[in-house]
Image: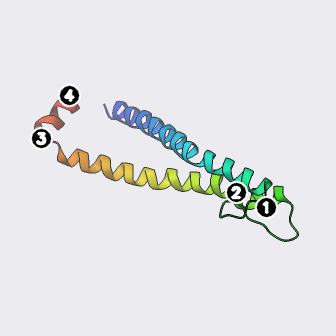
Amino acid sequence: MRRLGRGVAMAGLEVFFKVQLAYAYAARLPVAAVMAVATRASWVSHYSAVVPGESRLETFMLFGFFPQLVWWVSFTIIVGSLFGTLAAAIAGHLRSPEQVARHQS
């Protein structure tokens, strides 16, 4: 019975991770795209960064691609997992003993 419970939990975590990953990329890809256009077009805004002596591609990779599609995606997954775990724990404690017993059988 323990293995079954562990298997169900792992399947749930896998689905949760995929949802977090999809959300993270859905939130960050548009920002990275705007940053690419802003850097290429030399917009003077917070979406474009100009580093003297660096090419536009290097500037985009350093200030657009890696932060948006690596760092922020990782941050979103980690923080989302922490809050998702907290929400699941709270939801588990809010159930009545009858509901818990019904779900365990």
Q: Kindly identify which residue carries mark 3.
A: 97
Marks 4 and 3: in contact by CB < 8 Å? no
- Identify which residue, 67 or 87, lies in the foreground: 67
Which label's residue is closer to the chain start, 3 or 4?
3
> Circle 3 — which element?
helix
Cα distance between the residues tagged 2 and 4? 50 Å
For discs 2 and 4, the disc positioned in front in the rendered view? 2
Q: Within 10 Å of the Cα at label 3, are there few (<14), some (14-19), or many (20+) other Cα atoms? A: few
Residue to which mark 2 is pinned: 64
User: The residue tagged with tag 2: helix, strand or loop?
Assistant: helix
Foreground: disc 3 or disc 4: 3
Q: Is residue 1 left or right of residue 33?
A: left
Q: Residue at x 74, y 50 (%)?
A: 37
Is 2 above or below relative to 76?
above
The image quarter in which residue 1 lies: top left
Name the residue tied to disc 1.
Answer: 59
